[in-house]
Image: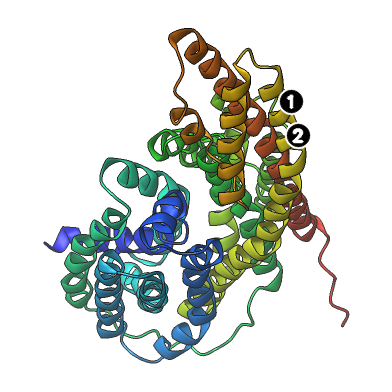
Amino acid sequence: MRRAVAPLLAVTVALVLADSAVVTLALPDILQELDASVSQVAWVLICFNLVLGLGAVPTARALVRVSPRIPSAVGIAVFAGASAWCAVAGSIDVLIVARCLQALGGALALVGCLELMVAEWGERRGVAAWVTAGVVGTATGPVAGGLLTQAISWEAIFVVQVPFAVLAVPAALAVRAAPDRAPDRHRPEVRSNLTLALLSAALTAALFLLVLLLVEGWRRSPATAAITVSVVPLAALAARPLARLLRPSPQVEVAVGCFLVAGGLAGLAIPPSAHLAWTIAPQALVGLGLGLTVDRLTAQAMDMRLPRVRHAGWTIAARHVGVVVGLAILTPVFTADLRDAQVPAQEAITALVIDAALQPQDKVDLARGLGDELSGQQGRVPDLHRAFTRLDLDPQERRVADALERDLDSQLERAATHAFRDSFLIGAGLALAALLTAVVPRRRRTS
């Protein structure tokens, strides 16, 4: 059991940070099953990051002068209980409240696990493991959520977290860690945390908007989308060995990482078609950039700054407030662009229906059905399949209707791709802003 203590704490860190985006691919199912509005479902994602971001620093301050064992165990237990509550939530309001409680427990668990992992593994290894677990969790959250949603249900996302968190409670209590009574000697590292916040806002486009494009815009299944976006965590894992091989300076490493994220998001903004292969290279760039930057910036923000737990709280706050800012900026843009794309898409659909080799009455019935689907699915990319299944056609006309449906789906895919373009480009701009904060020379102090 003793050897499993620190790994269980690392898994807990990964779980908490994975929850910042783990529900992304489950949002359409939550929208339907809980009979919620689009804005309510968005709060399932936003509330967790907002509470975690705002709660990290006060939680870290509270842990400075006390032993982290019991507060960490309490935080993990609250996280486990709230995860179970999320799984059985019968309404969207209950789910949002449970997510807020989950984030509060997660904030306490995150900062406490840092101290416990340092006590178990020592300063250097403990901090490195804490940072790495966070990067892995952040990158793999959407993948795990998509696979569980497709294979079982969206509730399974929260159910699987419970046993790991329950096992981590006695692991936290088993650590004999003395409180870090180092005096408050250092101010927060503003530059690294600002860069981290801007980069987290940019990464929201890759970890949130991309999966929405795949599932809602290109109509891929959650499992297909999850496998597709697995490129990001795989590339992130490959970034650290690459950095060790090339040995750039920390400043160069962060600058290159920000530039790669910007380039990857720009590539996602202009795919030639809705083929999944066009997302692979841009995702690889984003993943490499994530792997080069997030752990490096976190380490820089905490390097030689005491008390350690307080500065860890600032990095958590920077990351998750950045995610919230990214969602606040990008969500209105792509929803407005989706709304603006509806008129030209409807005109193109009308033209395709008029030109189709169908009987006049069948065209009228199809147009009526398509109109019902378009009006009933305002604010999202519509699924037109039901309009075609209602038609009573002979075999020859059915082949024509199937070809027409494929043409309409292609038209909608192009409209969705165009609607997400500006949001990806804004994300790229945020990554470039992070690059500027990283490369601007520090002002020298005058004596």
Circles 2, 1 touching at the beta carbon (< 8 Å): yes
- Residue that label 1 marks: 351
Across and down, in percent, residue 332 comes to: 69, 60
**Mark 2 secondary-structure assignment:** helix
Locate residue 46, reporting x and y percent.
53, 67
Residue 357 picture location, percent across and down: 63, 12
Quadrant of the frame with the N terminus: bottom left
Name the quadrant of the C terminus: bottom right
Residue name at image x 54 percent, y 49 percent: 207
**Numbered tag placed on residue 347 in the rendering:** 2
Residue 301 in sight here: yes
Relative to 338, residue 346 above or below: above
Q: Residues within 10 Å of mark 2 (few under 14, many from 20)?
A: few
Quadrant hosting residue 133: bottom left
Mark pair 2, 1: CA separation: 6 Å
Q: 78 or 137, which lies in front?
A: 78
What residue is drawn where x is 31% and y is 87%?
67
Q: Residue at x 49, y 7 (%)?
A: 396
